[in-house]
Structure formats: structure tokens, C-alpha cells
Image: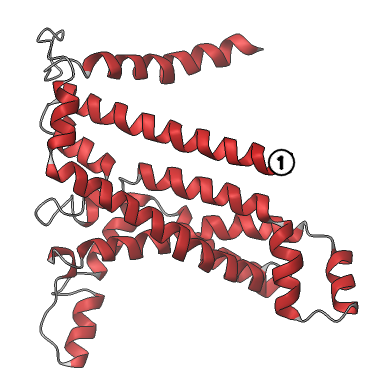
Amino acid sequence: MLPPALILFTLFVIWPLLNAGYYSFFDWNGYGSPEKFVGVSNYQRTFQHGIFWVSVKNTMIVLLVSLLIQMPIALALALAIYKKTPTNALFRLVFFLPFILAEVAAGLIWSFAFDGDTGLVANITHALGWEQFFILADRHYAFYAICTVVVWKYFGFHMMIYIAALQAVPGELIEAARIEGAKHWAVIRHVQIPFIRPAIVVSGFFAVIGSLQLFDIIIPLTNGGPSNLTHTVVSYLYTFGLTRLNIGYGSAVGVILFVTAVAAATLYQWQLNKAAAR
């Protein structure tokens, strides 16, 4: 049973990774065979490019927003609606809908909402008597608007992970805590959250990997602008590698991103094994 899966994994994962590593040592535009060997100069250019470090900073901001804002919101909502009732089922559906929506569609919807001429922001500023404000064109606020969309788009995914874990908490534990005099917040803190800690760890892992992969929302919202200040690492790779036909350079960025993702996954697995050994 192993060969079919192994062959597919090799063709669509291992082989492209090896090719990207090979192309990263060439100055190549994607046409013909790579011939101009440049060694590690693509990697040097990457680390010396200021916009690359802006994209790294933005990726870290998305990561922090996911861990410190998105996940707590998801946990709070999960604690509020995890019980199996028709009303809670409706709320779960409503909160999960943004995650079902395609990233590009979500980006387009929010680009209209943020539009300073006809969108939601335009209506609010007009109602308050303020001047027109084009948030996606503002170099100081554009990326925070993107972070807002990220939280809205993915909190439902984390919420469903927490709901599944909370529904598996034995009712006897909660009942015993209440008989002992534990209040509502004490039950949450000392019974439910410790019991669902593995789910929280998994959710955090998805938040980290998702932050490293963020791309589809950036393009319809800002396309990396204004002044290339809202790029993440993946949109930076796309803009300065693929669209400019610098395939060798883009491959170097891809290799850096891959190594970072592997390091994050390895750290996660190490922490998981360490916690299991306790």
C-alpha cells in the first residue's frame, strides 16, 4: 500500500523541492535550461534586500496576531457555544462561514469594504463627517487592515478545533468541580483549558504554518503595496521571483521559507514529545 503514496509524494513534493534547491544557484528566467551558475549570490541578494526583511517582519506580525488575538477570540467563542443546542449550531455555522469562503473572494470582498469612495469605510467616514480615508493605500495602516481580514477569515477554523475538544471533556469532571464549589471561570481555567491543551497546541501549530504561507489574501487586497510595505514572505517570493521572471531568485526565497517551515515543525514536534514525556 505504500508505493502509490510514496510515488505521489516524491513527484509532487520531494522532486519540486530538489528542483527549487538546484535552481536557486542559477540566474535563470524560467526559459530553457539554467546555465548561468551564480552560487549563493541569490541567497546573499535576498538577505541584503530591505523589502525581504519587511516581508519577514509582516509575517511575524501576522503570526503574533494569530497567536495573541485570533486564537483567544476563537477560544472564547468556543467556550460560549460548544454545547450542542440548535442556537449554538447556528452560531457555529455563522462563525465558520468566513473560513469556507475562498481566500481570493474574501480579499476582494474586503477590498470593496475598505474602499474609501464607495465601501463600508467610505460610508462610516461620510456619516461621521470625516475626510475620505483609503486605508489600503495608507502605508501606516494597510497591513493592520490585512491583519483584521486574517483574524476574521481564520478564527472560525480554530474555534471548531476548540469546540471539538471541549465536547470531548467528560461531563463528570465539570460536575465534580461544580460540586466542590468551583465557579464558572474556575471550571474553565482548571478543568476545560487543561483538558483541551493538546488541541490548543495543534491550533498554534496551524497558526504558525498558516502565517508562513499567507499569500492569497494579500494579492487582492494590496498586491504588496503601497511601496511594497505589505508583503509577506510568500507574496514577496511571488512578486520578486515569479512575476519578474527571476526564477532562480524566487527559488532561493522558497528554499529559505521551506527551511523555516521545517524548523517550526521540528520545534513543534520536539515540544509535543517533551510535553508527552512529562
Q: Nearer the viewer, residue 17 or 136?
A: 17
Q: Is residue 41 above or below residue 125?
A: above
Q: Describe residue 99's horizontal placement relative to residue 239 as left or right.
A: right
**Residue extending furthest front?**
278
Which residue is found at the position 75% from the left and 60% from the top? 167
Rendered image quadrant of residue 78: bottom right
Which residue is found at the position 71% from the left and 60% from the top? 194
Residue 29 in picture, x, y percent from top left: 11, 20
Q: Describe residue 49's horizontal placement relative to residue 202 as left or right.
A: left
The number of callouts visible is 1
Residue 143 in picture, x, y percent from top left: 24, 61
Residue 159 in picture, x, y percent from top left: 57, 60
Helix or strand or loop: what does disc 1 sit on? helix
Q: Can you say which quadrant of the picture contains the C terminus?
A: top right
Q: Is residue 202 above or below residue 112?
A: above
- Residue 172 in sight here: yes
Which residue is found at the position 18% from the left and 19% from the top? 40
Amino acid type shown at disc 1 = Ala
Q: Describe residue 59's horizontal placement relative to residue 68 as left or right.
A: left
Q: Is residue 59 above or below residue 76?
A: above
- Residue 84 in sight here: no
Residue 264 in picture, x, y percent from top left: 46, 38
Residue on which the image places disc 1: 276
Which residue is found at the position 34% from the left and 14% from the top? 18
Rendered image quadrant of residue 6: top right
Using a 10 Å C-alpha cutoff, classify the residue at mark 1 as few (fewer than 14 neighbours), some (14 to 19) or many (20 or more): few
Q: Nearer the viewer, residue 120 or 163?
A: 163
Q: Can you say which quadrant of the picture contains the N terminus?
A: top right
